[in-house]
Amino acid sequence: MNKTVRVIGCGLAGAEAVYQLAKRGFEVELYEQKPVKFSPAHKNPNFAELVCSNSLKSNELTNSCGLLKEELRILDSLVIKTADEVSVPSGAALGVDRELFSQKITEKIKSFSNVKIYYQTVEEIDTTIPTIIATGPLTDEKLLENIKELLGNDDLYFFDAIAPIVSKSSLDQNSYFIANRYDKGGEEGDYINCPMSKEEYQVFYEELIKAKTVELHDFENKKVFESCMPIEISAKRGFKTLLFGILKPKGLIDPKTGKMPYAVLQLRKESNFNDLYNLVGCQTNMLYGEQKRVFSLIPAMKNAEFVRYGEMHKNSYINAPKHLNKFYQLKNYPNIFIAGQLSGVEGYVESISSGLYAALNMANMLKNKSFVEFSNKTAIGSLSEYIATANQNGFQPMNSNWGIISHNGEEKIERAEIALQEIKQKAKNM
């Protein structure tokens, strides 16, 4: 039996894959380009860096991503386990201290004696070596070109954006209130809420839609994935678009007025050990100066100190239904699995699930055992089945959602119970 597996990239999917393989006794050759080389969006030299946000979304079982996380907990996901350990108050969501999160995962990966780490860029895939490619949506250009050659020169991508971060101490305490939407989560509330009146929102909106943005010279087709849509682009769809999206006031009551504000910007804690907060949903491609000018029009942020501005970058992914089976294995190169956002899944937890699923079946393939198969009644199985069977024409990355999870009309909590029962049974036999 071949006991050596190569894993390229140690983001969320790669770190999970390494852990699953290493704990099963495989020799793992991990290739990670950081800190020798950083992508435009990465800053932290540690593994499993969170770029866009520090939130892994809802923990509730009535939310498909909450179900996916619970499935991963049952399957002994290192990344989700670590997220739970370093969580920060985020209402019903799983928010983490992103620095501590990456640090702990890095320490765990390095603790395995059967994991050899090579800090270098891989430019070509050897299809004779069992390999999990988990280089993410910002895959190095030379490696991406090699992957495209293997796949027949498919060229798919979308634009992604990250949100700004501000310091809490710079906010106007008299202009915000602390609360969770519908009072879910901690007793005192985990989110800073920055309300706006209709007049204040009008001014903010008008300056937002005319703000200057960074020109993206290097791409012809400016594709933007919906879940990371820059706020200024969303705003241009209509005056009320943001009021039903990231600035929706529903479920929030301003204690000063006893009423629901016209619009609310929520800020979420970045860490348990400092006062950094990110602007929830405010991914942007505005020039840095414009970001400060426009967001400072929100009363609570009139003197806000920006410790990181938002950025926009290219995210790459393959045409999954054309090239992958539901185990994240390339149809034409069975030694090669692709996990993470490069595979066509979208989101932190979804990437983690793909790394775990790919590693489980890489291990079984090398042991000449039948593949582990999760049904489409589970969150993990429905996601992998969707990207493997979706329409090849115009394929775009997919988040976990109830729309792709098979059911017979049960309520969401009942669907979650059915899924978890299957996962628990499979976990016993793994």
Image (spheres, rainbow, N blue to C red):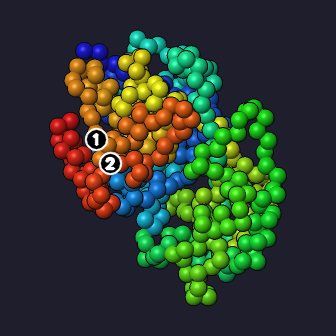
User: Looking at the picture, does residue 127 appear above or below residue 155?
Assistant: above
State the quadrant of the C terminus: top left
Residue 48 visible in the displayed image: no
Q: Nearer the viewer, mark 1 or mark 2?
A: 2
Q: Farthest residue in the bottom direction? A: 257
Location of residue 420 in the rendering, given as x and y in whole percent from the top left corner: 25, 51
Residue displayed at 52% across by 49% down = 99
Residue 50 visible in the displayed image: yes
281 vs 301, left or right, is left
Q: What's the residue type where badge 2 is placed?
A: Ser
Residues tagged 1 and 2 counted as in contact (Cβ below 8 A): yes
Residue displayed at 47% across by 39% down = 345
Location of residue 26 in the rendering, given as x and y in whole percent from the top left corner: 30, 24
Q: What's the residue type where badge 1 is placed?
A: Ser
User: Looking at the picture, does residue 248 appear above or below residue 346?
Assistant: below
Q: Mark 2 points at which residue?
A: 406
Q: Mark 1 points at which residue?
A: 375
Task: Report, in whole angstroms, how far the alpha carbon at label 1 lies from the one at label 2.
Answer: 9 Å
> Splitting the image into 4 quarters, where does residue 174 fall?
bottom right
41 vs 400, left or right, is right
214 vs 262, left or right, is right
